[in-house]
Image (tube, grey):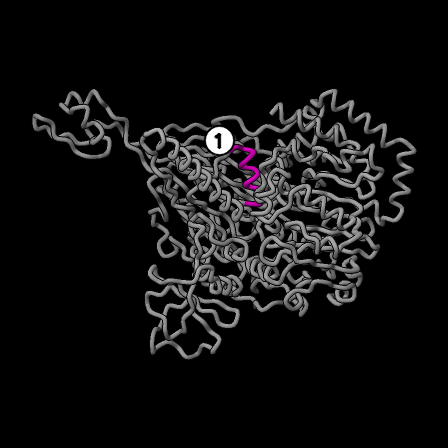
């Protein structure tokens, strides 16, 4: 049985963390971090998610460490569903042919191990994640396994494949405790800071029984009064808006201190008949507040080793002792065999020397606050625990790698290969090579809309000459632990050659681009545009598609996010799916990213589906850190969302300081404010009302409380965003005359039934909304991932972009990831669509 280890991720703009993938036969494990971008990177690396059974999160719990975990778990569940469906289809075919059926696939789900607050931050997503067809369990560190006796050597967790030692490292405490930022009345919620991590049992109950239930069946709760509860009831008590587990006393001894509004919620037994679709209890728990918690103060590291393996079986010796071949398997399984002559043969008589299990160490030191306590841990000097460790992955915060203590430890252990993984020891190489290479090809035909992405394949860290055991982390680094030790087992991920991709564009596409260039530089064409667009404000506003895919990210498209940059006013973000910040960093580089964050005024969250907001926490925190770096103590950021999503952010902010106190929520007034005026925006504390004259929210048919949104800027520019929805005349009428419509276009016209079933729009339906709205310019986005990249920018048959010679004003474009187009350049961009379609078609053919 082979055990291999691969460095799946190292810190880059796309993947701000280190992830180690361990594969043992049909079982996989993840160690380290699962940052945003993990799903997409795994897709590019062709790493299989479906076999993952355990995730061991290192470091302190915070969004940057596990922002991709929720999406990862959903993708694992999706992979399991797909495998089961494929097996069912195959068995149907075998049954028709009279063949023996294959056994049903079984999956025990995923167990996530980590430090305190892990359950809390995962359960904060409960309005988003509901009844997923995968079991998820959380094992959260709360006690030091060797705190009482540092000489203990037994593993803290094991299965039949590996053993794991969990190493908690406390943050160094200053003379005064960590202080939270004060929230004023405009942003503070019902949650007050706690002095220590909360009891994780409420969050774990929600995770395992409501969010990740292992089945898509309805999960329902029934209500009971406190004195009706029995010892075998698995109950949550909701009092006011606060939830807690209830473990007794019961019956007449139940406490009388609860208010009259307090209710207990329990799952009914199997014999209880409950009305179908009765989700009152589930909604109560989903909308209730988790017990307040404090910032995470513990960082996890790990030691993982394979089990010892038996020595090589000596068949000749067994035969010489009179053992029959059919009994060989008993000896290899550790059993004693008696031969026909009465000789007792024990395994040690026919097996070679036992092979000790080899392993790895995952050393996570995110900041200097953990440095001293890390090296004080007894595990690093325990010869028995450290025996067999062949590779040590150092997951380090920026600037930690040169620390003398780390260098001293590395020098003292030359028999271990040490791999440094940190922002200043790993190149900021392109993680999603397919997307970047496609963008380079498109740049060849339309350089004004398609940029080269920013990257840096060099590192600043100088590897000491006298430490041969030290390496710098590179994505794709592989090693084999068992049965033989093989370091550098395969090539690392290569640096993509964007110039090669740029030069690979065929002559036909280049000639089409030359025709387009001739047209867009024609004085008559330019004069006509000036006349037609004289009444459009902010024609220099730039629309940047950060994510144009739906549901899950893939190697060609990230999930939803559209950035609007309006010079002199600010930047506005329409939805913020996982990896949005990474897309900004990859497109703009460090200085450009700082400028985008500095100008960010408002983020719109259209609805609660995960692909539209899992990038919010990291983006908000990056904005906040930029404001601190600029010493802008009065900087505020508007978030237009429903009040339930505001509560999600507030619960995340209990785990780490993301700058929640600097956020303002203009739409969270009463049940939901559908129109927010400049005066109301100004009352939130922003003197310029975030550069806005009005925010209009329009309910649209998709999921619970989905809203389309129109932002009207102080300049008069009107930007309408559909979010996910079926075509809505109400939206079209409310935003009639908008200068820019960004509309979802999940399905082609041949998938009308799919669009209706899933409450999305087809291309024709989206264009129908644009016509009814009389939108001056329309950008279509949010394409189903079923469509290849060649479909994303095909000319729209029968519409403006395809009939440029027949209609004067070309107003519709289809978005591509990282495409940049100015509002006043839509007609120019439309001229390049045939060349772009040729590039994409050729790329798809070559692939």
State the count of labels: 1
Outermost residue toward the left?
Answer: 341
On screen, residue 839 versus residue 750, left or right, reads right
Please say if 452 is above or below 540: above
Q: Quadrant of the N terminus?
A: top left
Q: Which of the two residues, 765 or 146, is positioned nearer the viewer here? A: 765
**Where does residue 96 sit, x and y in percent of width and height?**
36, 31
Label the magenta part by its dominant secondary structure. helix
Q: Residue 590, located in which quarter of the rendered image?
A: top right
Task: Quickly name the residue at label 1.
Answer: 478
Please say if 10 is above or below 69: above
Q: Can the viewer see residue 812 in this picture?
A: yes
- Which residues fall within the magenta stretch? 35-46
**Where does residue 587 sit, x and y in percent of width and height?**
70, 39
The residue shown at (62%, 31%) is: 434
The residue shown at (42%, 48%) is: 111
**Where does residue 247 sit, x and y in percent of width and height?**
37, 68
On screen, residue 307 versus residue 637, left or right, reads left
Q: Which of the two residues, 606 or 645, is positioned nearer the viewer here? A: 606
Look at the image and say whether residue 200 sits in the magenta stretch: no
Q: Quadrant of the C terminus?
A: top right
Q: Residue 508, located in which quarter of the rendered image?
A: top right
**Where does residue 16 sit, x and y in percent of width and height?**
59, 43
Q: Residue 359, located in which quarter of the rendered image?
A: top left
Q: Which of the two residues, 513 or 207, is positioned nearer the viewer here? A: 513
The residue shown at (47%, 78%) is: 260
Please say if 451 is above or below 760: above
Q: Can the viewer see residue 458 in this picture?
A: no
The secondary structure type at the circle numbered 1 is strand
Q: Alpha-carbon neighbours of circle 1 within 10 Å: few (<14), some, or many (≥20)?
A: many
């Amino acid at each position: 049985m082979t055990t291999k280890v691969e460095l799946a991720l190292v810190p880059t703009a796309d993947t701000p963390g280190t992830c180690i993938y361990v594969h043992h036969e049909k079982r996989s494990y993840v160690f380290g971090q699962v940052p945003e971008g993990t799903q997409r990177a795994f897709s590019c690396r062709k790493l299989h998610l479906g076999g993952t059974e355990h995730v061991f999160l290192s470091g302190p719990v915070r969004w940057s460490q596990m922002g991709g975990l929720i999406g990862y778990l959903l993708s694992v569940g999706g992979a399991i569903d797909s495998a089961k469906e494929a097996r069912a289809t195959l068995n149907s075919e075998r049954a028709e042919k009279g063949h023996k059926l294959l056994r049903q696939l079984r999956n025990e789900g995923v167990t996530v191990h980590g430090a305190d607050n892990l359950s809390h931050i995962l359960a904060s997503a409960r309005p988003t994640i509901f009844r997923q067809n995968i079991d998820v369990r959380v094992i959260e560190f709360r006690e030091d396994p060797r705190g009482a006796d540092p000489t203990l050597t037994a593993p803290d967790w094991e299965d039949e494949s590996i053993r794991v030692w969990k190493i908690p490292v406390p943050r160094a405490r200053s003379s005064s405790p960590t202080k939270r930022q004060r929230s004023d009345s405009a942003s503070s919620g019902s949650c007050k800071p706690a002095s220590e991590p909360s009891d994780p049992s409420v969050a774990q109950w929600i995770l395992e029984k409501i969010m990740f239930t292992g089945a898509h069946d309805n999960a329902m709760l029934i209500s009971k009064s406190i004195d009706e509860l029995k010892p075998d009831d698995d109950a949550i008590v909701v009092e006011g808006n606060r939830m807690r587990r209830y473990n007794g006393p019961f019956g007449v001894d139940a406490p009388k201190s609860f208010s009259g509004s307090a209710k207990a919620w329990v799952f009914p037994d199997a014999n209880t008949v409950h009305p179908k679709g009765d989700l009152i209890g589930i909604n109560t728990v989903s909308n209730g507040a988790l017990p307040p918690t404090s910032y995470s103060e513990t960082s996890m590291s790990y030691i993982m080793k394979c089990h010892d393996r038996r020595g090589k079986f000596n068949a000749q010796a067994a035969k010489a002792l009179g053992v029959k071949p059919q009994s060989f398997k008993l000896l290899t399984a550790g059993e004693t065999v008696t031969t026909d002559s009465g000789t007792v043969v024990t395994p040690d008589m026919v097996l070679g020397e036992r092979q000790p299990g080899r392993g790895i160490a995952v050393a996570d030191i995110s900041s200097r606050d953990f440095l001293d306590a890390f090296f004080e841990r007894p595990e690093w000097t325990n010869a028995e625990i450290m025996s067999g460790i062949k590779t040590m992955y150092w997951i380090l915060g920026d600037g930690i790698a040169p620390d003398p203590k780390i260098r001293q430890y590395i020098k003292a252990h030359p028999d271990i290969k040490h791999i440094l993984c940190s922002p200043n020891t790993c190149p900021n190489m392109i993680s999603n090579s397919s997307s970047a290479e496609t963008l380079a090809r498109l740049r060849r035909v339309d350089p004004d809309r398609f940029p080269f992405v920013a990257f840096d394949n060099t590192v600043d860290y100088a590897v000491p000459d006298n430490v041969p055991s030290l390496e710098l982390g590179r994505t794709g680094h592989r090693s084999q632990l068992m049965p033989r030790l093989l370091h550098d087992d395969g090539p690392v991920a290569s640096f993509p050659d964007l110039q090669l991709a740029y030069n690979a564009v065929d002559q036909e596409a280049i000639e089409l681009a030359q025709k387009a260039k001739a047209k867009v530089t024609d004085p008559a064409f330019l004069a006509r545009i000036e006349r037609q667009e004289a009444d459009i404000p902010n024609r220099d506003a730039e629309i940047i598609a950060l994510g144009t895919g739906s549901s899950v990210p893939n190697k060609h498209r990230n999930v939803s996010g559209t950035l609007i940059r309006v010079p002199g006013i600010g930047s506005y973000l329409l939805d913020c799916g996982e990896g949005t910040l990474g897309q900004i960093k990859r497109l703009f580089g460090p200085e450009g990213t700082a400028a985008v964050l500095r100008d960010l005024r408002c983020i719109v969250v259209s609805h609660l589906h995960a692909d539209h907001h899992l990038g919010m926490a990291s983006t908000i925190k990056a904005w906040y850190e930029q404001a601190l770096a600029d010493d802008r103590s009065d900087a505020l950021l508007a978030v237009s969302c429903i009040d339930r999503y505001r509560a999600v952010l507030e619960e995340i902010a209990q785990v780490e300081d993301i700058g929640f106190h600097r956020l303002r929520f203009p739409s969270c007034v009463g049940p939901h404010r559908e129109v927010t005026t400049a005066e109301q925006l100004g009352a939130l504390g922003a003197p310029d009302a975030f550069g806005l004259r009005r925010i209009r929210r329009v309910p649209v048919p998709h999921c619970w409380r989905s809203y389309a949104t129109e932002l009207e800027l102080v300049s008069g520019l009107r930007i309408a965003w559909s979010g996910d929805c079926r075509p809505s005349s109400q939206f079209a009428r409310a935003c009639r005359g908008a200068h820019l419509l960004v509309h979802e276009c999940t399905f082609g016209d041949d998938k009308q039934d799919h669009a209706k079933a899933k409450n999305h729009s087809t291309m024709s339906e989206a264009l129908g909304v644009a016509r009814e709205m009389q939108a001056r310019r329309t950008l279509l986005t949010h394409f189903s991932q079923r469509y290849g990249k060649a479909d994303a920018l095909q000319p729209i048959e029968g519409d403006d972009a395809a009939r440029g010679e027949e209609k004067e004003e070309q107003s519709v474009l289809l978005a591509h990831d990282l495409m940049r187009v100015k509002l006043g350049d839509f007609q120019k961009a439309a001229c390049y669509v045939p060349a772009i379609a040729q590039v994409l078609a050729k790329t798809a053919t070559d692939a």
